[in-house]
Amino acid sequence: MKHHRGRARRLGDDINTDYIIASTRKKETLDENILKQYLLEAVDPAFAATVRAGDVLVAGKNFGCGSAMEVAATVVLAAGVPVVLARSFARSFYRNAINNGLLPIECDTSDIVEGDTIALSIDASGTTIVNERTGRRETRAPLGGIAGDILAAGGLVPYLQREGRFVR
């Protein structure tokens, strides 16, 4: 069983990939370790400076809409954020998150506010999300199939290396 406990960083609906990392920032580099200092600057210019390792991004519907750029998921991870909770995800962001080891969880985020402590427990029966402020608990079914295997391995590259289908 895996556990994670982190501070909620609240976002709204329709956070597109250009809000996550602006296209203008990607002209000079795609290095997520450099780009992380600009994370979500279109939403809040001070956001990146206030992110702490272990924070949990919490959004409404359609998180990661827009272009299908992989760096939108990798920059979130580079900033130390291992989990995104949202009411729904854009399909391309969801797959990019899984392929890079970022945990995307579709759940009810309506009662989560900025700064809430979110506790997650992940095991074979699914993921349980608890908002420690309200006590609300929600359990989501485990991610199955190859997507679940990829995420459990830490991303697509570790999965392929483990399965012997990729040599670096």
Image (tube, grey):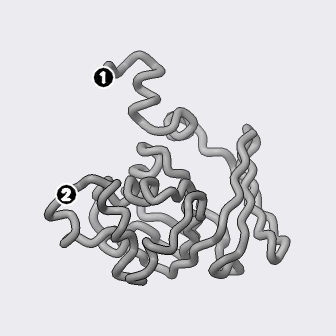
- For this orientation, the residue located farthest to the left is 27
So how many labels did they put on this image?
2
Q: Position of residue 11 (x, y in %)?
A: 52, 78
- Residue 168 is marked as 1
As drawn, the residue found furthest toward the right would be 135
Q: Which mark is residue 29?
A: 2
Disc nearest the viewer among 1 and 2: 2
Q: Secondary structure at mark 1?
A: loop
Give above or below for 144 relative to 19.
Answer: above
Quadrant location of the N terminus in the rendered image: top right
Q: Is 2 situated above or below 53? A: above
In the rendered view, tell whether residue 120 sits above or below residue 51.
Answer: above
Q: Residues within 10 Å of mark 1 (few under 14, many from 20)?
A: few
Q: Position of residue 154 (x, y in %)?
A: 51, 38
Instruction: Specify whether residue 52 is in view.
Output: yes
For label 2, the SS is: loop
Q: Earlier in the sequence, mark 1 or mark 2?
A: 2
Q: Residue furthest top?
A: 164
Q: Cα distance, mark 1 to mark 2?
A: 23 Å
Is 118 positioned to the left or the right of 135 in the image? left
Residue flagged by tag 1: what amino acid is it? Arg
Q: Is residue 91 visible?
A: no
Expressed as whole percent of the image width and height from the top left, the position of residue 165 reads 37, 19
What is the x, y in percent for residue 48?
Answer: 43, 72
The residue drawn where x is 85% and y is 71% is: 135
* Mark 1–mark 2 CB contact (< 8 Å): no
Residue in the picture at 71% in, 65% down: 118
88 and 153: which one is in front?
153
Three-letter residue code for mark 2: Thr
* Residue at the image position 30 percent from the left and 23 percent from the top: 168
